Amino acid sequence: MASQAMTPESVDFSKWYNEIVYKADLCDQSPVRGCLIIKPYGYELWEAIKNGLDRRFKATGHQNAYFPLFIPESFLKREAQHVEGFSPELAVVTIAGGKELEEPLIVRPTSETIIMATFKEWIQSYRDLPLLINQWANVVRWELRTRPFLRTTEFLWQEGHTAHASFDEAEAETRQMLDIYADFAVNDAAIPVIKGKKSDREKFAGAMHTYTIEAMMGDMKALQSGTSHNLGQNFAKAFDIKYVDENNEFQHVWTTSWGLSTRMVGAVVMAHGDDKGLRLPPKLAPYQVVIVPIYKNDDERGAVMETVERLAKLLSDAGIRIFVDRRESLSPGFKFNDWEMRGVPVRMEIGPKDIQNNSAALARLDIPGKEGKQFAPQEGIENRLKDLLADIQANMLKQATVFRDANIHDVKSYDELKRVVDQGGWARGWWAGSGDDEGRIKDETGATIRCFPFEQPGGAGNCFFTSAPAERIALFAKAY
Amino acid sequence: MASQAMTPESVDFSKWYNEIVYKADLCDQSPVRGCLIIKPYGYELWEAIKNGLDRRFKATGHQNAYFPLFIPESFLKREAQHVEGFSPELAVVTIAGGKELEEPLIVRPTSETIIMATFKEWIQSYRDLPLLINQWANVVRWELRTRPFLRTTEFLWQEGHTAHASFDEAEAETRQMLDIYADFAVNDAAIPVIKGKKSDREKFAGAMHTYTIEAMMGDMKALQSGTSHNLGQNFAKAFDIKYVDENNEFQHVWTTSWGLSTRMVGAVVMAHGDDKGLRLPPKLAPYQVVIVPIYKNDDERGAVMETVERLAKLLSDAGIRIFVDRRESLSPGFKFNDWEMRGVPVRMEIGPKDIQNNSAALARLDIPGKEGKQFAPQEGIENRLKDLLADIQANMLKQATVFRDANIHDVKSYDELKRVVDQGGWARGWWAGSGDDEGRIKDETGATIRCFPFEQPGGAGNCFFTSAPAERIALFAKAY
């Protein structure tokens, strides 16, 4: 609940982010290197994200389960690319119960290996397929440079793991889950994401195809916000997961995995925040409406608080998440700033005049100043607020979409890409380069292929880098 | 979905338990020593437990947060009794990111120390109190002997941690949370628990008082199902957590912690199960009603499935958790046994006769055979089922209460206690013995003081063990 001056987003985005996550009480530093404490306000945001996803997972036939935190070292080594990808980041338990372990245990960086070893036991026949499992869990990757929510040593996420009878079914699942992530991002988080495929260079360690949703943050950098992997038969073969098909023949299964993490909290902060602080989309906001009582003396206080408590109950009963700022020692002006900083979508003010007029003042966060302020009759205010919240949700998505679209530029040459990237934008162009070419662009400009968007212009063109004929466009950007 | 013969509960309870948790698909063995895989059916049960508790925590002003999985070794050592209590059970990360760590990290066995180190930062003034935090998390205790859900190396739980301005407030919180656990156990899990206080010998490492809910399992052994600790100022002093009171003076805070774990899944299994398998209380059952279609040929099948799907939608829309057993290759009889084994409270059968009569057959699990079977008109069946589920919930609580009360015996001498304990029952008697006396009884009979029940007969008596004047009765039993 600090009130000190904050670095404006427009001055130093990175500094702004590092300040706002703490000032808005989303998280706190922990005494453990690279690990974050998620404070109640941040955790409620994560719970809203979790609920939004979990509902969608269950509606599409997935079931939650839980697998061990520890993975025997030998398991991780079975899939060659996978172990190569994760080895540098592992935390290892070597002592337990006072004794040195015979085989060290890895704290899971992701659970493909232990889940695949289990799927081998669960799958015998085609009747056992598809097997659609999700896990909500903590995972650990020993990152050298960490940033709150974006990259931490321990983080919370969900990881889906599924097994199928054919490539086509696995591919359909992989795409379905990406669609679910995108649906959540767009409709709940008000973040217009671009769906696409990762280049081979950027795909998951052990995957055939990796699909991603890429979001543009307030500084125009890209944030990979959720990924879905078609693992082909790589893990099925490494873990020998076979089923008997309808012709009584043994086949390896096809598997997928897909994950979305507390990184999404960072995405919400960076996609919507402004100089005044957070701006939370109503569907995810821990408090959708904050009620600030306004009075000058005890007389006024009595009447105001009576109305405030009555309206608070009315709104709460109507299913609106509200918070009444009852703090005595702070001025209304301080409270306005405080809740603007914490990104509550609507502020409701109740003062003596409102008591007289049976009204309340409503200020919407997405439209600053007078333009976003209105007086509403107390009668039926719950419906008025529901409409207002829906309107804010829609408007925030629109604002983020306009911003994004204004900052994606088509490029026809490497020079053009350099200019675009240099100004912080995303560059979109025909691409037929190699992995090494990607590497060179990354080294020289800092930009990577975020994805080959599913939405392609059609036809063909010439690669902006190699001039060779190209069949698809790629999206380049600097990324978190 | 196995159908092999099962050890009857009445023949070998322990063996029955170890078989049923796997056969009913609650869990699976994992390749990691002492760690369990919680399968979807078991995890849904845990989710119902979680939701039931989380709702109650939030209604009493608690907020969820998340703290690091890892605890620096030095933190754990700060509270002397605490480190002594947990040292033998720790899992230790010594290598991370490819390097030996300077200070080893403990995988949390419980989070008092890291949370208290954080509370020190969060608490400055009396205005910051009470601080009411809960965490849903995995914890690790390296147990030598493990049993599914009851004692595993890794388990899932919630741990509440609160700080208060006075002993009285901390004590009230400790008792409130025990009441919440009891309310959940009785009303959601249909397990009649006894609330009471632990003896000094059995209390939590670092606590002033530990309160417990004790439940009687089907073999009459006790299961400690949830505990709430008044930690006094032990942790506040060890971590130097002070606040400025209203007189501007520094005071140490008073803290509490309370936890309930996946052990509750084991409690539900062992409190209600019978020779046929699980019996799940409707409020927690992943499926409250299973619908089994009955037909002999394709003609019948068409009409039956049409009605089944229509009723399935009706019930599902009415908020009843249902499962339609559409498996083609299995007989209705097999399915009946299978769902009885998995403990679904109500089985609904729909056959050709039911189509003719616009009826459905309902079989309740809590009353076996003909007596528990009824035919209900399809019209309004959703309300009939809601009533039936409520009745089953109440009846299961009654059954468990009758069983428990029949197996608690008042004892006036050590010999009487031995006889009671030998027959598996609980012994209740006046107690004024020492911790060493408790130890002797444990060594000689296997029974421990489960608690000093809050409900006391009043007055005073003579200790059944030492004959000294005693002011309270204690409850002795063998326990998990």
Image (cartoon, coloured by chain):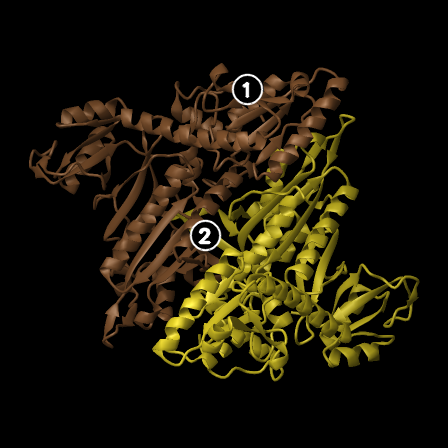
Chain colours: A yellow, B brown
Residue lying at 73% horizontally and 21% vertically, measured from the top left: B301
Q: Which amino acid, mark 1?
A: Gln
Question: Residue A189's x, y, as percent?
Answer: 64, 62
Front label number (2 vs 1): 2
Residue lying at 55% horizontally and 50% vertically, measured from the top left: A136
Q: Nearer the viewer, residue A422 or A374?
A: A374
Left or right: residue A317 compared with residue B57: right
Question: Residue B333's x, y, as percent?
Answer: 60, 17
Question: Residue A54's x, y, as percent?
Answer: 60, 49
Q: Which amino acid, mark 2?
A: Trp
Q: Which residue is mark 1?
A: B4
Quadrant where the C terminus of chain B is found in the figure: top left
| Chain of the residue under label 1 | B
Please identify the residue farthest to the front as the structure is shown: A356
Q: CA distance from mark 2 to mark 1?
A: 37 Å
| Chain of the residue under label 2 | B
Q: Say if B3 sits above or below A242 in the image.
A: above
Mark 2: give few (<14), some (14-19) or many (20+) Cα within 10 Å: some
Badge number at residue B136:
2
Q: Say if A76 sits above or below A203 in the image.
A: above
Which picture quadrant has residue A310?
bottom left
Q: Nearer the viewer, residue A161 or B290?
A: B290
Mark 1: give few (<14), some (14-19) or many (20+) Cα within 10 Å: few
Q: Say if A335 sits above or below A397 in the image.
A: below
Q: Is residue A306 in view?
A: yes
Q: Is residue A23 in view?
A: no
Q: Say if B226 sits above or below A300 in the image.
A: above
Tell me the SS state at disc 2.
strand
